[in-house]
Amino acid sequence: MFRGHYEHTIDAKGRTSLPARFRHVLPPAGDLRLVIAKSIRDACLDVWPMAAWEELEAKVARFNRWDRDVVLFRRRYLSAAVEAEIDAHGRVLIPQSMREFASLEKDVLWAGVGTTMELWARSRWEASLELPEADLARWTDAIAEKLDA
């Protein structure tokens, strides 16, 4: 599981280091492939280990292919994803279009969110955590209900 968040930078070529703790979570067999997708909820990138991405693809393949929501998900999320590889220095090259989508310029933040990771512009990460008091109360109740289920 990917846990925690780590601040890094992204260089002019679009490379950023994958946190060492995240590299240790990847399969020991040495599969250094990742899949990077534009988040469908936030202005960040979802980063999947290849094995987890393949599980997602297999799950989606079982859905009704004619369902409008499924078609849209396949077009907007699956087809827009790109494969990336971790280089010998532990860096990942983030394609320009992905950097623009997530506003990745210099300071970035890797967030472990269970079986996947998120890559954020540092300033956007801070903003994503803010909730008005009324929303915080609703969220607290909703998540408590889900955790108790």
Image: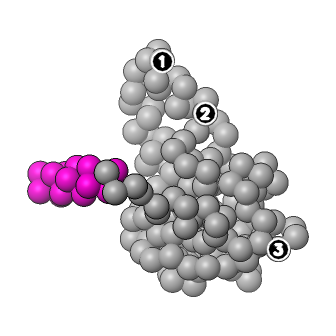
Could you tell me residue 98's position as x and y percent? 73, 52
Query: Mark on residue 76?
Result: 2
Q: What numbered label is drawn on residue 115?
A: none
Q: Residue at x 26, y 55 (%)?
A: 137
Q: Main secondary structure of the magenta part?
A: helix
* Helix, strand or loop for disc 3: loop
Pick the quarter of the image with the N terminus: bottom left
Q: For the point 71% across and 49% down, which residue is it? A: 101
Q: CA distance from mark 1 to mark 2?
A: 12 Å
Residue pointed to by mark 3:
11
Q: Is residue 147 magenta?
A: yes
Q: How many marks?
A: 3
Q: Most extreme residue toward the right, as rendered?
A: 12
> Residue 86's quadrant in the figure?
bottom right
Query: In terms of image quadrants, where is residue 58?
Result: top left
Tag 2–tag 3 contact (CB < 8 Å): no
* Position in image of residue 141 (x %, y %): 20, 53
Question: In the picture shown, does residue 43 fall above or below 59?
Answer: below
Amino acid marked by disc 1 = Arg
Compared to 50, does 13 lie above or below? Answer: below
Q: Position of residue 56 (x, y in %)?
A: 45, 45
Looking at the image, which residue is at 51% across and 51% down? 53
Residue 100 visible in this rendered orientation of the protein:
yes
Three-letter residue code for mark 2: Arg
Give the mark nearest the N terminus, 1 or 2.
Answer: 1
Q: Which residue is mark 1?
A: 68
